[in-house]
């Protein structure tokens, strides 16, 4: 899928660029990252992964706000980043955002065998989220 298809399907909506909303989203990303770290310390690995994803989601959304887009779909954020910033941000960020989005969905809504999230996986998610938030702060 492409950005124009996401717009046509209502998954992304054009708006006026809004640096204030972008900065609010960065603050939300930092807040969720702090929660993820506390959940990691408490050995609540599933929640740590969800919070790491949410941190990345808010950071990515900051880019969209800055560029004049609003998301209506978590999936569309990855589409936007791949197409618009594929050569400008590290590929691991988009890959991890997509992977954590799927894991979050499975943890929260899945009816299959529960995912077992290891301490190492939660730690990696948090470290990548922290790196992504810092990269986004430099872009905004």
Image (spheres, helix red, strand yellow):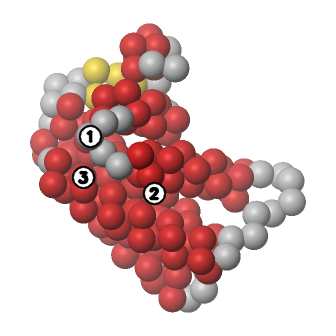
Residue that appears at 45% across and 70% down: 126
Q: CA distance from mark 2 to mark 1?
A: 22 Å
Q: Helix or strand or loop: what does disc 1 sit on?
A: loop
Q: Nearer the viewer, mark 3 or mark 2?
A: 3
Estimate the x, y position of residue 119 in percent, counting from the top left: 62, 80
Q: Earlier in the sequence, mark 3 or mark 1?
A: 1
Q: Is residue 1 above or below residue 43?
A: above
Q: CA distance from mark 3 to mark 2?
A: 14 Å
Kindly give the residue lying farthest to the front in the view shown: 87
Q: Count the labels in the image.
A: 3
Query: Which residue is tagged 3?
Result: 136
Residue that appears at 56% across and 88% down: 42
Estimate the x, y position of residue 57 in percent, counting from the top left: 41, 50
Estimate the x, y position of residue 49 in percent, counting from the top left: 56, 66
Query: Which residue is tagged 1?
Result: 88
Kindly give the residue lying farthest to the bottom in the view shown: 42
Q: Is residue 31 above or below residue 69?
A: below
Q: Helix or strand or loop: what does disc 2 sit on?
A: helix
Estimate the x, y position of residue 28 in percent, counting from the top left: 31, 60
Query: Which residue is tagged 2?
Result: 54
Q: Nearer the viewer, mark 3 or mark 1?
A: 1
Q: Earlier in the sequence, mark 2 or mark 1?
A: 2
Residue that appears at 52% across and 80% down: 39
Side (left or right) of 27 relative to 106: left
């Amino acid at each position: 899928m492409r950005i124009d298809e996401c717009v046509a399907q209502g998954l992304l909506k054009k708006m006026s660029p809004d640096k204030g909303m972008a900065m609010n989203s960065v603050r939300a990303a930092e807040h969720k990252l702090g929660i993820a770290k506390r959940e990691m310390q408490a050995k609540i690995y599933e929640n740590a992964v969800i919070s790491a994803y949410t941190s990345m989601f808010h950071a990515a959304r900051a880019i969209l706000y800055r560029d004049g887009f609003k998301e209506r779909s978590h999936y569309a954020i990855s589409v936007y980043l791949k197409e618009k910033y594929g050569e400008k941000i590290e590929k691991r960020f988009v890959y991890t955002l997509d992977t954590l989005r799927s894991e979050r969905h499975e943890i929260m809504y899945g009816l299959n065998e529960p995912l077992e999230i290891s301490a190492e996986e939660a730690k990696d998610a948090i470290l990548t989220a922290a790196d992504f938030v810092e990269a986004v702060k430099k872009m905004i």
